[in-house]
Image (tube, helix red, strand yellow):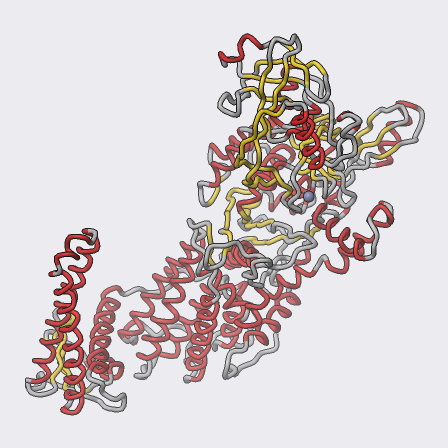
Amino acid sequence: MEQRTEPAKAYDPKEVEQRWYRRWEESGVFHAEPDSTKAPFVIAMPPPNITGRAHLGHGSTYTTQDILVRFHRMLGENAVWIPGLDHAAIATQAVLDRELAKEGKTRHDLGRERFLERARAWKDEYGGIIDQQFRLLGFGPDWARERYTMDPALSAAVAKVFVELYREGLIYRGNRLVNWCPTCASTLSDAEVEHEERDGTLWYIRYPLGDGSGEIIVATTRPETMLGDTAVAVHPDDERYRALVGKQVLLPLQERPIPIVADAAVEREFGTGAVKVTPAHDPTDYEIGVRHGLAMPSVIGLDAKMTAEAGAAYQGLDRDQARQRVVADLQARGLLVRTETLHHAVATCSRCGTVIEPLLSLQWFVTMEPLAKPALEALRDGRLRFVPERHGRTYAQWLEHIRDWNISRQVWWGHRLPVWYTPQGDVIVAESEDEAKRVALERHGTAELTRDEDTLDTWFSSGLWPFSILGWPKQTPELAAWYPTQVLVTAQEIIFLWVARMVMLGMHFVDPERPPFRDVLITPLVFDQQGRKMSKSLGNSIDPLDLIEKYGADATRMGIVRQMHLESQELRFSESRCEESRNFNNKIWNAARYVLALEAPAETGLPAPEQRTLADRWILTRLGETVESVTAAYHAYEFSTAAERLWKFLWNEYCDWYLEATKLPSPGRAAVLTTVLDVALRLLHPIEPFITEEIWQLLPQRRGDGASISRAPWPQASELARDDAAAARFERLVEVIVALRRLRADAGIPARELPQASLAHVDLDAEESALVERLARVRLVAPAPAGGTGLLTEHVGDVELALRAGADAAAREAGRLQAEERRLIGEVERLEQKLANASFALKAPPAIVQKEREKLAGYAEELQRTRQRLTEILK
Ligand SMILES: [Zn+2]
């Protein structure tokens, strides 16, 4: 690798980051081959949509993965991060539909084949943008292993899983109630439906009994669906209606007799306790319909317009117009009793916001219960672990109440169902068209087939992700070495949609004992400072690429990681953390320049213990502790803890104290400085890959060996000699120095002056005295300077400090203290009067009175201290 030996004066993240990313990629540092002699560490990257762009959520979820893989690679494991892209059926089709709309066309004008060609071309042109953005963020997956959900091999895995589930009887086709979005013109999974709280109306409608003996009043929020009612239901224990069960009512407007049935699903407290049953347009009614064998006429069609079944008066109206017409007609006939306003949840499409229409439709389903059982057991016996643990309950609750999965979608972009129909109406499910033809020839003597028009739910292919990317169903070396993976890192909103399905399918098809990952790490959602979701419409979204432009990728990553606390699942993002991190990087850069400008150490190893200064022994001890705590934090996914520890170590301990201490030259200082920097850079590398590599390459130990820090061994605390007694001694000196600096500052002593100071009750050796003099900028004298004007004193534990401030400085300090005294007297008087005021004492809440009393006590104490110092300085 070409080397630069002199560090640039100012750190330029843009130049450094581009240069290193290119070299890493060219030299293959992210690439791995399966190696069974090492422990595997594998992360399957959640494939972003081909329509995706990097956002701050990637900053938290994907930076985490990059940190983990870099960390485990340095631990010497067979670490690999496998990237990919998801074809994102509905999202991509929506983008293309919008493009076509601008040309005044719809996809139907193009036809299926031309539309798919266009989609593929779109993917080739724009599908990789997010990969480039990930490179800017410093993410280092094994790009050579990138997979796409519609790669031929992955599509073959999809077909195989479909066919096998079908043969096992776990995939079936049926007329079932589905969530239908009339705008997207497709079914949606339950997880793609949102429930919005809205104000609506509850209509009370009279249904006359068929025998003319009276009526039953039902309450509904959707009067238009009454055209498809096939029963009225009451709770079996409801005394009010017991006598009516089994009778008929005459459905108004349709004039059709329908039965009154008893069903435990009815909520007695809702409305009148009697509800209309529309099995084709409501999930609960559908279940009542199945239990009571009711007819299920569909009165609303796929276009959200009323069908012929709704009757000639309503056919063709859209559902909102139909509602108005039905209400008006009921009113005209005196069948509307009253209305109430009602706050209730309305199901809407998570993609376009349209109100969902539950519809009966001929769709394909997976029977989930047998698949859910092993997935639930894996969580219960600890083979699968959620971090934070509470997300495991969400996962379990969904699996315990699992419903069959509607997997067919009426979009064109996606995996087309491997299902063919013969002219006789026979269904042939096969892994390929050729195979389907062979079967058709055998069974019917014809190869004439029509393929099912539908495609599969996007989550069907991503549900196979952890093993399809390793070559399954082929028994590849990758599958043998890298399955199951170690950890999945993702966001909480796709625990059902994705995580649970990967566990179910992985345990069903690949390994019945082991889920496809041991840990599921759920990263926090990113919000703005006020706790609002970031969105374009609110104008509060932050583009990570803008942050990189301003602060560099390292500082962007560090800024995010420092705010990412494991237990809190909400990250209120503050850009100032990125700015601070840029300052942190500049601090490290300047420290490195200082270190590298020193005479090169004769030997690269540490000086012998007896040659180490007190400061050497202290920084090596602190380094050892840092190695331990940072390593433990990475293992525990406590990334902000690791970041904060490294921040404190590098900024405060290394730069502020140790570097200053080495300004008193010692024979081993260059070796200690570079050794400590080497170790700290390796610890920091997973979070800040670029600056650590740039500096590490400049260390004298490294010059010219061509290795990357990302493949350097992880530091071991045991390699570092710890000396706790020396560290404690150094830390007391630090306290003394801080106290002397404070005294200097209080007295306003200019930086160039070296006042006399003395320390009592402590024995300092020559090295320690020199350190105090150098870092506190004082001249130590013994014995204590005689009393008199301008003597400032302080205690640090047992140690007594005295600083001779000089007459001028003492006078300045006395003036400052007198002003402070006047201010404090004023505060004390004000509060005393307030508390003495009878009306305040009576009317104010006791907590406020108490607070004011505490304030007064505080001021009084401060006043006493100020007067004491004044006496000292004036004596
Ligand atoms: Zn929609």
Q: Is residue 366 visible?
A: no
Q: Quadrant of ligand 1?
A: top right
Rendered position, 678 above or below 567: below
Q: Quadrant of residue 425?
A: top right
- Residue 716 is at least partly visible in this image: yes
Q: How many numbered dots are placed on residues in this image? A: 0
- Please state which of residues 702 and 215 is positioned toward the viewer in this rendering: 215
Residue at figure coordinates x 79%, y 52% from the top left: 119
Q: Is residue 849 above or below residue 598?
A: above
Which quadrant of the figure contains the C terminus? bottom left
Residue 118 pos. (x, y %): 82, 53
Q: Is residue 649 left or right of residue 347?
A: left
Q: Residue at x 82, y 34 (%)?
A: 452
- Residue 17: which quarter of the image? bottom right
Residue 652 x/y as whole percent: 34, 71
From the viewer's perspective, tell me whether residue 509 is left or right of residue 304: left
Q: Quadrant of residue 825?
A: bottom left
In percent of the image, x 22 and y 83: which residue is there?
773
Residue 219: x %, y % from top left: 57, 25
The N terminus, quarter of image: bottom right
Q: Is residue 767 above or below residue 243?
A: below
Image location of residue 847, percent across then percent down: 21, 52
